[in-house]
Image: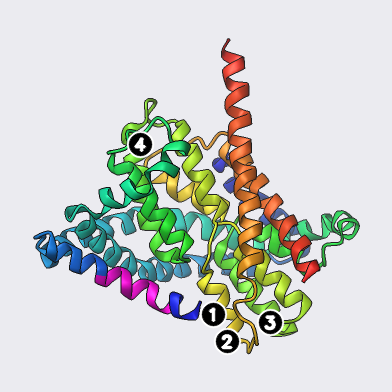
Amino acid sequence: MINKIWLALFFLGYLVAGATGRVEETTLSLIHSMEESVKFILGIIGFLSFWSGLLRITEEAGITTWLSRVLNPVLNRLFPNIPSDSPALGCITLSLSANLLGLSNAATPLGIKAMKELEELNPTPGEISEEISIYLALIMGGISIIPSTIIAIRAQAGSQHPTSIIFPMFLASLAGTCTSLLVHHIIKKTQREGKR
Amino acid sequence: MKLISIWAIPLFILIVLICGEYKGVKVYESFIKGAQDGMKIGFQLFPLFLAIFGGLAVFNASGALELLCRLFLPLTNRLGIPAEILPLGLIKPLSGSGAIGYTANLVQKHGPDSFLGTMASIVAGCSETTFYVITVYLGVVGITRPKHLVLMGLLGDLVSFLVAIMISRQL
């Protein structure tokens, strides 16, 4: 799927560029994007490393397992197949908390950690497990109580109520997350019936 | 609210360091070990960003993205979605930074508390960047077939987009 989408971006892009005579600008923009991605990775690698360093301490101090014990009841219901003392649950909790606090830069390294733990529990490595599907439904839903970037943009533009968007945003994200979870359950059901 | 967002990161750092010290962890040494892992993850991620940024650059600069938006125009008119908001809904699943940039532009142009400015902020803030999550999260564990995840993410995006527009009309 991702292969076809990526191909389509280039194919359709250059098709349109050819038709509108913007081939040269498009190529310039492509070359520029290579530089941009280097800048981007350099920009986040510091944050990524710092956060991974902190996480290592969290792990060695046993904070991750402690946190997962607190949130166990909720997560157990969502992930019935993961044993409740597994470090995977702690990582999932941490990454969801980072998302909730709008620490989107911190959320990625935490999420990557959670994915690695989930892949170790995966009964079919290299394929999407049920747990990975549920976890990514929650991540893609992106429920947030402090959308820090948007608030910063609004405050900078001189808003009188930069935080007024928090609750509507929360409701919209919640609706999206529920939809994704619903899609997960419908697909799971049809797959099971297909196997019979 | 402002206080919470200002203190979220410092509190996290302090709690982790103090708990680590209390539990007898050598905080500095284990930080260094963890940061080395972080570097490795960063280098692993670079090709992913290179691929996505490149593809999007071509799609955007060629005018294909604009064309795509124009194709959807009859539909959006019927649903009552402002023409300025639709590109945001289309960019959002593909590129988080693109959506943020587009929103910043719109907020500057129309004012953050205007109808369009508020709506754009709400749309941009809800839900994560679907294709970013799929590429990075699956890529890092070596899963190459996203199967139903694309459908799942995009339907979630669609619903949160429509709900965001509905709610901001009520404000």
Q: CA distance from mark 3 to mark 4?
A: 42 Å
Given residues A51 and B40, the one toward you in this image is A51
Q: Mark on residue B112?
A: 3
Q: Does residue B4 sit above or below A81 in this rendering? A: below
Secondary structure under the numbered disc 4 in the rendered image: helix
**Amino acid found under the numbered disc labelled 3:** Pro
Circles 2 and 3 on the same subunit: no
Q: CA distance from mark 4 to mark 2?
A: 41 Å
| Quarter of the figure with residue A187 | top right
Cβ atoms under marks 4 and 1 closer than 8 Å: no
**Of pointers 4 and 1, the one earlier in the residue sequence:** 4
**Amino acid found under the numbered disc labelled 4:** Glu
Q: CA distance from mark 3 to mark 1?
A: 11 Å
Please name the residue that numbered disc 4 is placed on.
Answer: A119
Secondary structure under the numbered disc 1 in the rendered image: helix
Structural crowding at the residue carrying mark 3, measured as other residues with C-alpha within 10 Å and reported as few (<14), some (14–19) or many (≥20): many
Quadrant where the C terminus of chain B sits is bottom right
Secondary structure under the numbered disc 3 in the rendered image: loop
Task: Note whether residue A117 is visible.
Answer: yes
Residue appearing at x 33%, y 68% in the figure? A47
How many circles with numbers are drawn on the protein?
4
**Amino acid found under the numbered disc labelled 1:** Ala
Please name the residue that numbered disc 2 is placed on.
Answer: A156
Residue appearing at x 63%, y 22% in the figure? A190
